[in-house]
C-alpha cells in the first residue's frame, strides 16, 4: 500500500463495483478498482461477467472488445470468451488451444448492486453477503462519490462515537450492543438526532440504528424512528480505486407506508438528507492521517476492537503493526454513525407534526419489525424531555378559532403557503389558512390550489393536535392523508403553537 495507509494490501472481501443498470445487455466497460482494470460485460441475454483485462492470446486489452451473443470478443483477433472466461471460438483456427481462458472475477448481482470479490492472493470467496429482503421497501435511490481515503476509514466511522456531535450534530448516544463473528460485525445504538442541520426544529429525537458490516466494504444501516412506523435502510459500500482513492456507493430505501404519496415524500427527504450529510466526513477523511497508535479517550468507542476485527481481511507479515492501546477497547462502546443516523431524527418531528402539543409520542418504543430490532437491549426509560405545553384543545373548533391568534410570524418568515384541512365525520369541517408576508388568514371552505392538504377524521385530528395520536403513524398507516410537502407539515407545530392560546 501507499505511504498513507500502513496496510499490506487492499482488504479481502466483497466490494461494490457498480450498479446493474450501468452495464446494459451487449455492453462492455472497463472499471478501475483495486488498482486494476476490470473488464465487465453483459451478454445479449443479460448475463453479467467480469474478466481480467489481458487477453491470453497476445495481450490485447479486452475492454476494447465487444459482445456478440453470449460471448465477449477480443478486439485484436476476435477470440470469443464465454462468461466463465473460457475461449469458445477462435475464428481462424481449426482447433481452440487447450485450457484457453481469461481469468474471471467472482461477482454477484444482488439488491441492486454489483459485488466483486477481492483477494490479494486470488483466493475464492471466503464468505457470502446475505441478500436483503426487498419486499415492502421502496426502490433503490443511489449515489456514487469518489474520496481520497481508504475503505477501513469509512467503516471505522461507524464505531467512532465522539465525532457524531462535531460532524453530524448528533446528541446523546447509547450503544446497545456490539457483536463480532468472523467477517460480520454489528453495532446497535440509540441516539438523539437533531433536525437543525436540515432546517427542521432543533429538537433532539430518539433514533435507533442497527449497523451491520459484512467485511470492510459492505455496510448496511437500518434505522427505526421510535415514535412511528418509519424504517429506513441505507447501504454504504466503500471500494478501493487505487491506494489513495476510494469510491463510495450509497443506496437508500425506506419501508413502504400505506400512503404512496407520503412514502415518496419521506423517501425523498431521506435521500436528499443522505446526500447532504454523509459527505460532511469527506474533508476530514481526505486530510487526516491514519494513526496506528491513536491517542484515544473515554467515549471514543470501540476503535481498537474494530481495528482488531479488521485485521482478518489482510495478510500481515509476521510482525503486525501495533494496535491501539488495549485500554481503548475497554472504552464505552461507540456510536455508528453514517450520515443517516442523524437524518432519522427529522422523522421524529413528523411524529409530532402537525400536533400542537409537541409531545405526540404516545407509542414510544413500539416497533413492528421484529426482524430489524429483535436484538435491541432495553436500557430502561430515558430521562423524559420537557413537554412544551400540557394544555389541550377541547374541540377542533377551538383549534381553528384560535388559529390566527396562535400564528407565529417569526416561524413563518417569508413563507407563502396555503394549508388546507379536510376533516370528516360527525364534526366534519373544511378550512384553509393562507400564509403570506408574515400574516395568516383562516377561511372556511376549500382552496383551488392549496400547498398542502390534511385529510383526516375530525376526531383523529383532535387526538393528534392534543398529542394523543402519533402524526407520523397516522399518515404512514393511511389513517390520515397528507397531500403536499411533508416539510411544511413538520413546520406546523411552530407556525401554530399551542402555547399562544393558553
Ligand atoms: S490478443 Fe486477443 S484475440 Fe489475439
Ligand atoms: Fe461520520
Image (spheres, grey):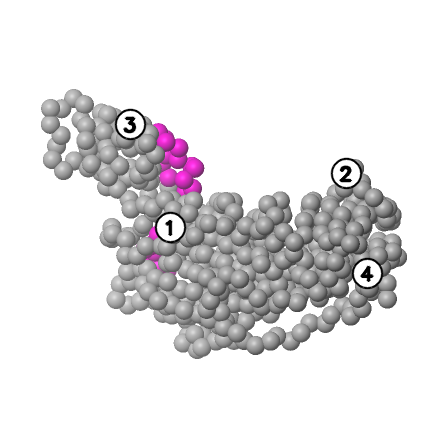
- The answer as to whether callout 2 falls within 8 Å of ligand 2 is no
Residue 352 horizontal/vertical position (percent): 69, 60
Residue of label 3 = 69
N-terminal-most mark, 2 or 4: 4
N-terminal-most mark, 1 or 3: 1
* Label pair 2/1, CB-CB below 8 angstroms: no
Frontmost of labels 4 and 3 is 4
Secondary structure of the residue carrying numbered label 1: strand
- Asked whether 23 falls inside the magenta stretch, the response is yes
N-terminal-most mark, 4 or 3: 3
Label 4 packing within 10 angstroms: few (<14), some (14-19), many (20+): some
- Residue 104 sits above or below residue 256 on the image: above
Residue of label 4 = 395
- Asked whether 355 falls inside the magenta stretch, the response is no
Near-viewer residue (228 or 384): 228
- The answer as to whether callout 3 falls within 8 Å of ligand 1 is no
Work out which quarter of the rendered image holds the N terminus and state it.
bottom left
Task: Give the CA distance from mark 2 to mark 4.
Answer: 27 Å
| The disc label shown at residue 15, or none | 1
Q: Is residue 124 left or right of residue 330?
A: left
N-terminal-most mark, 1 or 4: 1
Secondary structure of the residue carrying numbered label 2: loop
Amino acid at each position: 500500500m501507499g505511504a498513507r495507509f500502513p496496510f499490506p494490501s487492499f482488504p479481502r472481501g466483497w466490494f461494490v463495483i457498480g450498479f446493474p443498470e450501468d452495464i446494459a445487455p451487449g455492453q462492455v466497460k472497463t472499471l478501475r478498482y483495486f488498482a486494476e482494470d476490470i473488464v465487465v460485460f453483459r451478454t445479449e441475454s443479460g448475463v453479467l461477467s467480469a474478466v481480467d483485462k489481458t487477453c491470453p492470446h497476445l495481450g490485447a486489452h479486452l475492454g476494447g472488445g465487444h459482445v456478440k451473443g453470449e460471448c465477449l470478443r477480443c478486439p485484436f483477433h476476435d477470440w470469443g470468451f464465454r462468461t466463465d472466461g473460457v475461449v469458445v471460438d477462435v475464428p481462424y483456427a481449426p482447433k481452440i488451444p487447450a485450457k484457453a481462458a481469461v481469468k474471471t472475477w467472482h461477482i454477484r448481482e444482488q439488491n441492486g448492486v454489483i459485488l466483486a470479490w477481492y483477494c490479494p492472493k486470488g483466493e475464492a470467496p471466503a464468505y457470502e453477503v446475505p441478500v436483503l429482503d426487498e419486499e415492502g421497501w421502496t426502490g433503490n435511490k443511489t449515489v456514487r462519490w469518489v474520496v481520497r481515503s481508504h475503505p477501513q476509514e469509512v467503516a471505522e466511522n461507524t464505531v467512532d462515537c465522539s465525532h457524531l456531535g462535531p460532524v453530524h450534530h448528533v446528541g446523546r448516544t447509547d450503544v446497545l450492543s456490539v457483536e463480532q463473528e468472523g467477517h460480520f460485525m454489528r453495532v446497535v445504538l440509540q441516539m438523539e438526532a437533531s433536525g437543525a442541520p436540515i432546517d427542521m426544529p432543533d429538537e433532539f429525537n430518539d433514533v435507533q440504528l442497527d449497523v451491520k458490516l459484512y467485511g470492510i466494504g459492505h455496510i448496511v444501516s437500518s434505522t427505526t424512528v421510535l415514535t412511528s412506523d418509519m424504517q429506513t435502510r441505507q447501504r454504504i459500500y466503500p471500494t478501493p480505486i487505487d491506494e489513495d482513492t476510494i469510491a463510495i456507493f450509497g443506496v437508500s430505501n425506506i419501508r413502504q407506508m400505506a400512503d404512496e404519496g407520503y412514502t415518496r415524500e419521506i423517501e425523498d427527504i431521506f435521500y436528499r438528507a443522505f446526500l447532504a450529510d454523509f459527505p460532511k466526513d469527506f474533508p476530514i477523511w481526505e486530510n487526516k492521517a491514519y494513526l496506528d497508535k491513536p491517542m484515544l479517550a473515554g467515549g471514543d468507542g470501540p476503535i481498537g476492537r474494530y481495528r482488531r476485527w479488521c485485521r482478518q481481511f489482510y495478510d500481515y507479515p509476521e510482525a503486525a503493526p501495533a494496535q491501539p492501546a488495549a485500554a481503548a477497547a475497554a472504552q464505552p462502546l461507540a456510536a455508528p454513525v453514517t450520515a443517516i443516523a442523524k437524518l432519522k431524527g427529522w422523522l421524529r418531528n413528523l411524529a409530532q407534526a402537525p400536533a400542537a402539543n409537541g409531545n405526540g409520542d404516545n407509542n414510544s418504543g413500539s416497533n413492528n419489525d421484529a426482524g430489524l430490532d429483535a436484538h435491541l437491549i432495553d436500557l430502561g426509560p430515558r430521562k423524559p424531555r420537557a413537554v412544551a405545553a400540557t394544555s389541550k384543545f377541547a374541540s377542533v373548533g377551538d383549534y381553528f378559532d384560535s388559529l390566527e391568534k396562535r400564528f407565529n410570524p417569526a416561524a413563518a418568515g417569508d413563507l407563502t403557503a396555503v394549508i388546507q384541512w379536510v376533516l370528516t365525520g360527525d364534526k366534519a369541517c373544511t378550512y384553509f389558512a393562507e400564509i403570506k408576508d408574515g400574516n395568516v388568514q383562516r377561511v372556511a371552505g376549500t382552496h383551488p390550489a392549496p400547498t398542502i392538504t390534511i385529510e383526516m377524521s375530525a376526531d383523529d385530528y383532535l387526538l393528534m393536535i392534543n398529542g394523543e395520536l402519533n402524526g407520523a403513524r397516522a399518515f404512514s398507516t393511511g389513517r390520515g392523508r397528507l397531500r403536499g410537502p411533508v416539510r411544511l407539515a413538520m413546520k406546523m407545530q411552530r407556525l401554530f403553537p399551542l402555547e399562544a392560546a393558553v
